[in-house]
Image (spheres, rainbow, N blue to C red):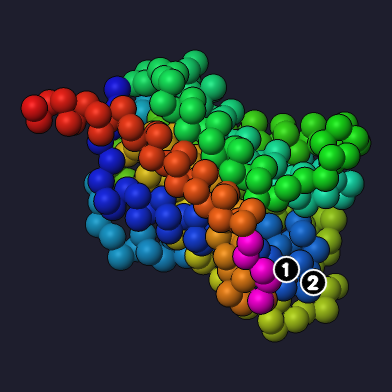
Amino acid sequence: METQKTLRDYLMLLAIGVVWGGQFLFNAQAVQAFPPITVAAARVLIGAITLSIVTGFISEPSTPHAKRSLSVGILFLCIALFEAVLPLFLIVWGQQHVDSSVTAVIIGSVPIITLILSVFMSKRKGFTVYSGLSVILGFIGIVVLVNPSAGGIGGKFIYEMAIFLGAVSFAFSLNLLERIPHSSPIRSVRNILWISSIPLVIAALVLDKPWLLAWNLEGALSVLVLGMIGSGLAYLMYASLTQRCGSVFTSLSNFIVPLVGVILGVAIRGEEFGSKEGLALVLIIAALAVNEAKLLFRKRVEAV
């Protein structure tokens, strides 16, 4: 069943894209100061702490039934595994030998994978022509934006497959997010981040030995921003929007992320914005419009 989207939903979708698109500016600084796994572990841990503090100021009823709590706990564990732990290791490992532009195209397939998985995992919607055309247009927009070299996809198959499996894992987790009880998104995200932080922190302690690293103030501040906003606030919005509007609509933010990265590069780094970026913008807006075409048409018919 299609859910009517409000202006708030579209603004939240845009906000997620802006936050996660802007994180590349902070990521560049953070990775220069600390190893990738340490950055990821710190981000998730700071995000969990941030939402725990926010939760302390919010009064919400808890789930009364222990049986339901157990099932929700298992769901949180699965989401943490497929949302953060697996994608982190698979994508970081794959990017050691795959260009960033090719990686962006592969990650851009998340909405398509989400849509396909939703046919089997979701109770309330099926695969429609509108939603299918929407994700195809968005994916074309990403291809136009990053413009990978002809020899990009096809070589180094094992590493590319690792990144693709990371995208599949992320898409799978999006469909699982729809099953979280609607009572408290902030508590749900907080719990997921705490669960995700455990294996990441252990991996960082064992592999990177953070206590031996030379700390950098700019890098530390970048990680702090990434954790509080990128892993805390943005993930909360993502989970809330997924519960309200579904995984396929929410996954469209993955089309906005690379575009925002380009726009911020133009504004902050003085990079050129040409016809390629303009065409990508048109395609992405078209993808969002097509996704809602069926609902808008239905509303117009009902109004007649």
Foreground pick, 135 / 186: 135
Give the structural element (helix, strand or loop) at label 1.
Answer: helix
Residue that protrudes farthest toward the bottom in the picture: 217
The residue positioned 77% from the left and 52% from the top of the image is 100
How many numbered dots are placed on residues in this image?
2
Q: Answer yes or no: is residue 72 visible.
A: no
Residue 174 placed where, x, y %? Answer: 50, 35
Give the amino acid type for the residue marked by disc 2 in the picture. Gln
Residue 57 placed where, x, y %? Answer: 30, 65
- Mark 1 touching mark 2, by CB under 8 A? yes
Q: Which mark is residue 256?
A: none
Residue 215 placed where, x, y %? Answer: 77, 79
Q: Is residue 158 left or right of residue 87?
A: right
The residue positioned 64% from the left and 53% from the top of the image is 276
CA distance separating discs 1 and 2: 6 Å
The residue identified by callout 2 is: 32
Give the structural element (helix, strand or loop) at label 2.
Answer: helix
Q: Is residue 106 above or below residue 238?
A: above
| Quadrant (top left/top right/bottom left/bottom right) for the C terminus | top left
> In the picture, residue 157 is in which quadrant?
top right
Foreground pick, 164 / 193: 164
Give the amino acid type for the residue marked by disc 1 in the picture. Ala
Q: Which mark is residue 28?
A: 1
Q: Main secondary structure of the magenta part?
A: loop
| Magenta region | 270-274
Q: Which callout, 1 or 2, points to the residue nearer the camera?
A: 1
Q: Answer yes or no: is residue 60 visible.
A: yes
Foreground pick, 65 / 278: 278
Residue 212 placed where, x, y %? Answer: 85, 73
Q: Is residue 19 left or right of residue 156?
A: left
